[in-house]
Amino acid sequence: MKTIICMIVDESGSMGGNVNEVVEGYNTFIQDQLKLADEARLHLLKFNDNVNTVLRDVNLANVPLLGGHSYTPGGNTALFDAMGDGINSVASSKRIDERAIVVIITDGYENASRRYTEQQVRDLIARYKAHGDWSFVYIGECSQQFAARMGIPASNAINFCHEKGKIRANFEAASAACTNLRSNKLKASDVLFNN
């Protein structure tokens, strides 16, 4: 089964001390996902006060790796805008024979969205989860509480690792979740982490 992966990555000011680790973590994520046999396409969104759609519906084999110059943290955290944009981007390109996995990585809390509310994003998640071929993963602050509020399964949510030198662990967790879904030929899963 083909897979669409949507990576939504925090680029707010609080990520400023982690540029190299984020770049390395993301690049390792891409390299790990390329090892799997099924076909995959990627959407990449970075966000702070604004949402930047870096890649939209690009075959994984054609995804460029990030350099330090392409990840420049600053500003606040428009988390709901990023989630809304990411989900809608995938929905507009997803085909009937594909599954989607949306991965959110953030070290902070929503504080800057202007276009999407919490309720609107929660409704989007519920709508697409009901299709049976969408999975959502949250790696962030107070993961269990946030997941419960948004309708993301508890076993698809873990806390963001803030420890210096271990920021890459967040991308390793994202890769493990995507690999779990893709290698087990699942259409969707509510248990992508072993919490």
Image (spheres, rainbow, N blue to C red):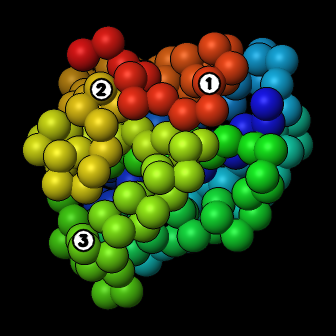
Quarter holding the N terminus is: top right
Q: Amino acid at mark 1?
A: Leu
Residue toward you, 121 or 12? 121
Residue 44 position within the rendered picture, expressed as x and y whole percent measured from the top left:
62, 54
Residue 78 at least partly seen: no
Q: Earlier in the sequence, mark 2 or mark 3?
A: 3
SS of the residue at dot 3?
helix
Q: Earlier in the sequence, mark 1 or mark 3?
A: 3
Q: Which mark is residue 172?
A: none
Residue at 63% across, 14% down: 184
Measured along the vertical axis of the image, is residue 161 above or below residue 8?
A: above
* Nearest-to-viewer mark from 2 and 1: 1
Disc 2/disc 3 C-alpha distance (Å): 21 Å
Quarter holding the C terminus is: top left
Residue at 35% across, 68% down: 123
Residue hosting label 3: 118
Q: Amino acid at mark 3?
A: Glu
Q: Which mark is residue 186?
A: 1
